[in-house]
Image: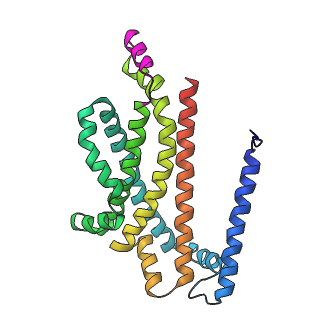
Amino acid sequence: MHRHPPISKLQSRIRRLWAALFWLLVWQLAAMSVGQRLLLPSPLASLARLAQLAQTSAFWRSVLFTLSHILAGFFGAMAVGAAAGALAARFRGIRDLFAPLIAAAKSVPVASFVIVALIWVPSRRLSVLISFLIALPLIYTAVLDGLAAVDPGLREMARVFRMSPWNRLTRIELPAVLPRLSSSAGVAMGLAWKSGVAAEVIGIPAGSIGERLYKAKVYLATPELFAWTLTIVLASVLCERALRLCLRSAVRAMERM
């Protein structure tokens, strides 16, 4: 079987750059063919509007508002999901108890969550709750699957040699969980941003990115709508990259122990 030669990190980055440039070109050609900024602004028009917005304090206050709320929901999901996953891996009864809730959290549409949540929480806290609910199943499943994949022989060895709980955690369980958690947490971060901003668009909390998106749509400010969308994409990607970097560093630290 023919195997392709391994691709270096530099080559991978160059390919991703060319892919991004290709789709920017497609966007530009589509905007030129439409010929109306109201329907489809060009990349340059969107970036120009983003540059204008970035010079205002209101822009950064909105970014900070949404960022803080989404990260609060996400890290809350990390804490609860990790604890629940560890308990479910330890006790079959708890796993069966959590199964319907996790299945519901995976399948119920975000809009349904948002509409019901508006009954329980004020709109300013809505994105925290929705980000939490969307990220929780992914974190829970990653921890549960990671612990389930631990070699039973290693557990037996730890019992025979009477390893301390801390050593079992750092030498056996975390090395099995962290690779899965790194992958799932990156996906969960992206979904938390998508669902959190969607919740803000519906709840329209004052000072949020969702409110700015909603107003841009109402006033047909299409370049501003695209500018805020680019902001969301950039913020989501940066958060995801930072999270993956931290978790990969933790994995390498575990491997060196």
| Viewer-nearest residue: 195 or 224 | 195
Above-or-below relation of 179 to 184? above
Location of residue 53 with respect to 11 vertically, above or below? below
Question: Which x, y percent locates residue 5?
Answer: 77, 41
Q: Is residue 256 magenta?
A: no
Q: Position of residue 56 (x, y in %)?
A: 54, 75
On the image, which quarter does residue 154 sit in?
top left
Above or below, 80 against 135 in this view is above
The residue located at (53%, 71%) in the rendering is 229
Determine whether 49 is above or below 107 in the image: below
The quarter of the picture where the N terminus appears is top right
| Quadrant of the snapshot with the C terminus | top right
Of helix, strand and loop, which mostly describes the magenta segment? Answer: helix
Q: Position of residue 134 (x, y in %)?
A: 37, 55
Q: Which residues are magenta?
A: 149-163
Describe residue 101's horizontal placement relative to residue 50 as left or right.
left
Q: Nearer the viewer, residue 256 or 4?
A: 4
Residue at 36% from the left image edge and 49% from the top image edge: 136
The quadrant in which residue 131 appears is bottom left
Which residue occupies 52% across, 54% down?
239
Instruction: Residue 163: name its quadrant.
Output: top left
Does any portion of residue 204 appear in the rendered image?
no
The residue at the point 44 percent across, 17 percent down is: 153
Q: Residue 176 appears at what percent x and percent y?
A: 48, 30
